[in-house]
Image (cartoon, helix red, strand yellow):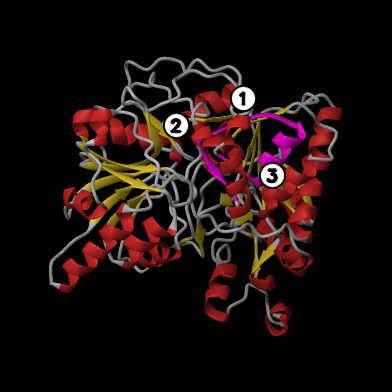
C-alpha cells in the first residue's frame, strides 16, 4: 500500500484500526463521512461493530449516535446496525437492516432536509460532537486533507469534533485532487453573508479540508473501494416517464419559458433518473449544466459526450463499473465536475438563484399534488426526504416522477390523500408517470385533481379516483380541496388489511 500521507508529523499518527477504535466510547456522538455509498470509512465501522458485539456478549452496553452526510455503505450502516450499535441516527438512511430497526422502534431516527444538517449541528441541537471518522484520499505536505468521492457534512464534522480519526484510502484516485470546492464562508445568524455563487461552475472555496492536527488522534491507511449496488436498467415504464418529461422540456423551450440549454439540472437517484439522463443524449439540448446533490452514471455519459458542460454536486453515486471507470479517469474531469459541502450543494438560496430544474421521485402523490417521498402506509420509513425538499421548494420548476402503481399493481401511487406529507402541493409543479404528465402550475386544487387523475393515474384505479372525487365534491365539508374524511385514507387501510388497494368486485358494487 503506497502512502498518501505527505505530512511527516501526521505520518506518525498511523495506527492499526484496533488501536484507532479505542477512542470511540459507548454513548458518543460520532460523525462519519459518506454520502450515497461514496467516501465512507471502510475500516473503522466493521472493527467497531465487532467490538460492540463483544461488549454486548459480555453484558456491557455499547451504542453510539451516528451522524453522516446521507446514506453510506454496508460496511458502515449495515455493520453497525447488525451489531445493535446505533441508538440514534440521522439525517438519511437506505440500509435495510437500519430501516428495519427504525421501523421496529429499536433505533431513534430523524429524517430531515439535508441542507439543514450542518447549520443545526453548529447550533448545538444534537449536542456536542465527540468524534469524527472521515475518509480522505490523501494528506498534503502542509497537512491539508484531500477529500475523496463525497463531501457531505465532512467539513462540519472536522470543524466541530473533539477528536478526529482519518482513513486515508489509496483506492481513491489521486486524480480527485482538484475536483473539490470547500467553502469556509458560512456562518450562523446574525453573521451570515450571501453565498457568492451566480453560476453552477463558480468555485468559491478551496480544494482541501482544513483540520487542527492536534485533534487528529489516529490515522488508518486502507485501499478498499466504495461499494455501490448496480443500478437497475431503465425499463419500459422508466423510459415512458422519461419520454413525457423530455417532451415537456422541449415544449417549455418552444414557448420561451426555458433557454435552449435549459437551466441547471437536479436529479434524484434511480432508474427513472438515469432514463431521463439517457434521453437527454439525443434530445435537442446542448451546453447543459447540473447543480445537484449526486453525480450518477448518466451524467458521466453526458459529460463525456459533450452534452453536459459541467456538473456540481456533493458526492458521486455510481454503479460499480462506472465508479471504477471514474477512478481511473478522475483527472480528466477536473474542469467538468465540482464536489461541494452539502450545505452548499443543497442551499435553498443558491438553488433559487440558479433556477434549477428539480426532478425527484416519490412514493405516492394525491389528487391535489401533495407528495409523500419517505413513508410507506403513513408510518414506515423507507429512506427519507433527503435533499428533495431543498430542491423542490426552491426550484424554477419542481418535478416529481413515479410509476403509476407499485407492488405489481396492488398499490396505486396516485391516491385520494397521501398518508404522509413531505412536499405540500404548493411545492409540487409537475407530476409525471408512465401514463402521462400533469403540469399543475397556475391551477386551483380541483383543477389539479382532474388533471392528475386523467393524466397520471393508472387505468386500474382511475375510475375509483374519479368516483371518490365526484362524491367528495358533493359531500365534503368545504369545496377548496374536497375530501371525505372517512374515506381519504381508506385505500391505505385496505392495503394493510388485504394486501391490495384495489376494490374487489363485491366492494365495487356496493
Is residue 297 a member of the stretch shown in magenta? Answer: yes
**What is the quadrant of residue 487 in the picture?**
bottom right
- In the rendered view, tell whether residue 387 sits above or below residue 319: above
Q: Mark 1 touching mark 3, by CB under 8 A?
A: no
Q: Mark 1 points at which residue?
A: 335
Q: Mark 3 points at which residue?
A: 298
Calculate the distance from the C-alpha at mark 1 to the C-alpha at mark 3. Answer: 18 Å
Q: Residue 112, percent across and down?
A: 42, 45
- In this rendering, would 265 be left or right of 167? right
Calculate the distance from the C-alpha at mark 3 to the C-alpha at mark 2. Answer: 22 Å
Name the one closer to the observer, 126 or 426: 126
Is residue 272 a member of the stretch shown in magenta? Answer: no
- In the rendered view, tell whether residue 202 sits above or below residue 508: above
The kind of secondary structure element at disc 2 is loop
- In this rendering, would 178 be left or right of 335? left
What residue is rendered at 67% in x and 80% in y?
Answer: 507
The mark lying in front, picked from 1 and 3, is 1
Q: What stretch is highlighted in magenta?
A: 294-318
Q: Mark 3 touching mark 2, by CB under 8 A?
A: no
Give the number of the disc on residue 375.
none
Q: Residue 375, percent across and down?
A: 49, 59
What residue is rendered at 49% in x and 29% in y?
Answer: 177
The kind of secondary structure element at disc 3 is helix
Please report whichever mark, 1 or 3, sits nearer to the chain's N-terminal start: 3
The residue sitting at the front extreme is 2
Q: Mark 2 points at which residue?
A: 341
The kind of secondary structure element at disc 1 is loop
Q: Residue 357, percent across and down?
A: 66, 33
Q: How many labels does the image show?
A: 3
Please report whichever mark, 3 or 2, sits nearer to the chain's N-terminal start: 3
- In this rendering, would 145 be left or right of 62? right
| Quadrant location of the C terminus in the rendered image | bottom right
Amino acid at each position: 500500500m503506497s502512502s498518501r500521507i505527505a505530512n511527516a508529523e501526521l505520518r506518525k499518527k498511523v495506527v492499526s484500526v484496533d488501536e484507532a477504535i479505542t477512542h470511540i466510547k459507548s454513548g458518543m456522538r460520532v460523525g462519519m463521512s459518506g454520502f450515497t455509498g461514496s467516501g465512507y470509512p471502510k475500516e473503522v465501522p466493521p472493527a467497531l461493530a465487532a467490538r460492540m458485539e463483544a461488549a454486548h456478549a459480555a453484558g456491557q452496553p455499547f451504542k453510539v449516535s451516528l451522524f453522516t452526510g446521507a446514506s453510506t455503505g454496508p460496511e458502515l450502516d449495515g455493520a453497525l446496525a447488525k451489531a445493535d450499535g446505533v441508538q440514534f441516527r440521522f439525517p438519511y438512511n437506505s440500509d435495510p437492516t437500519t430501516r428495519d430497526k427504525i421501523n421496529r422502534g429499536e433505533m431513534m431516527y430523524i429524517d430531515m432536509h439535508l441542507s439543514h444538517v450542518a447549520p443545526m449541528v453548529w447550533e448545538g441541537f444534537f449536542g456536542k460532537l465527540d468524534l469524527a471518522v472521515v475518509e480522505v484520499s490523501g494528506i498534503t505536505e502542509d497537512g491539508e486533507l484531500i477529500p475523496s468521492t463525497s463531501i457531505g457534512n465532512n467539513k462540519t464534522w472536522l470543524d466541530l469534533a473533539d477528536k478526529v480519526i482519518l482513513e486515508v484510502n489509496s483506492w481513491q484516485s489521486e486524480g480527485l485532487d482538484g475536483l473539490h470546492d470547500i467553502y469556509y464562508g458560512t456562518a450562523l445568524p446574525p453573521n451570515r453573508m450571501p453565498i457568492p455563487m451566480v453560476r453552477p461552475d463558480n468555485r468559491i472555496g478551496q480544494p482541501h479540508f482544513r483540520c487542527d492536527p492536534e485533534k487528529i488522534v489516529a490515522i488508518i491507511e486502507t485501499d478498499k473501494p466504495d461499494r455501490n449496488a448496480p443500478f437497475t436498467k431503465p425499463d419500459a415504464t422508466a423510459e415512458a416517464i422519461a419520454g413525457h418529461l423530455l417532451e415537456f422540456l422541449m415544449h417549455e423551450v418552444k414557448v420561451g419559458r426555458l433557454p435552449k440549454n435549459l437551466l441547471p439540472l437536479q436529479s434524484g437517484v434511480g432508474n427513472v433518473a438515469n432514463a431521463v439522463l439517457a434521453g437527454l443524449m439525443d434530445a435537442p439540448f446542448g451546453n447543459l449544466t447540473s447543480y445537484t446533490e449526486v453525480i450518477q452514471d448518466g451524467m458521466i455519459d453526458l459529460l463525456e459526450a459533450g452534452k453536459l458542460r459541467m456538473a456540481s454536486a456533493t458526492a458521486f453515486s455510481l454503479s460499480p463499473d462506472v465508479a471504477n471507470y471514474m477512478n481511473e479517469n478522475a483527472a480528466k474531469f477536473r474542469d467538468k465536475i465540482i464536489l461541494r459541502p452539502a450545505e452548499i450543494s443543497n442551499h435553498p438560496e443558491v438553488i433559487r438563484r440558479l433556477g434549477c430544474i428539480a426532478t425527484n421521485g416519490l412514493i405516492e402523490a394525491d389528487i391535489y399534488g401533495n407528495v409523500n417521498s419517505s413513508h410507506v402506509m403513513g408510518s414506515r420509513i423507507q429512506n427519507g426526504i433527503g435533499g428533495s425538499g431543498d430542491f423542490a421548494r426552491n426550484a424554477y420548476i419542481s418535478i416529481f416522477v413515479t410509476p403509476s402503481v407499485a407492488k405489481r399493481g396492488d398499490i396505486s401511487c396516485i391516491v385520494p390523500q397521501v398518508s404522509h406529507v413531505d412536499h405540500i402541493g404548493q411545492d409540487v409543479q409537475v407530476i409525471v408517470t408512465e401514463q402521462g404528465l400533469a403540469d399543475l402550475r397556475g391551477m386551483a386544487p380541483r383543477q389539479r385533481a382532474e388533471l392528475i387523475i386523467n393524466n397520471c393515474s393508472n387505468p386500474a384505479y382511475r375510475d375509483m379516483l374519479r368516483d371518490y372525487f365526484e362524491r367528495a365534491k358533493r359531500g365534503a365539508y368545504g369545496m377548496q380541496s374536497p375530501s371525505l374524511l372517512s374515506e381519504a385514507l381508506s385505500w391505505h387501510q385496505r392495503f394493510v388489511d388485504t394486501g391490495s388497494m384495489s376494490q374487489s368486485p363485491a366492494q365495487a358494487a356496493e
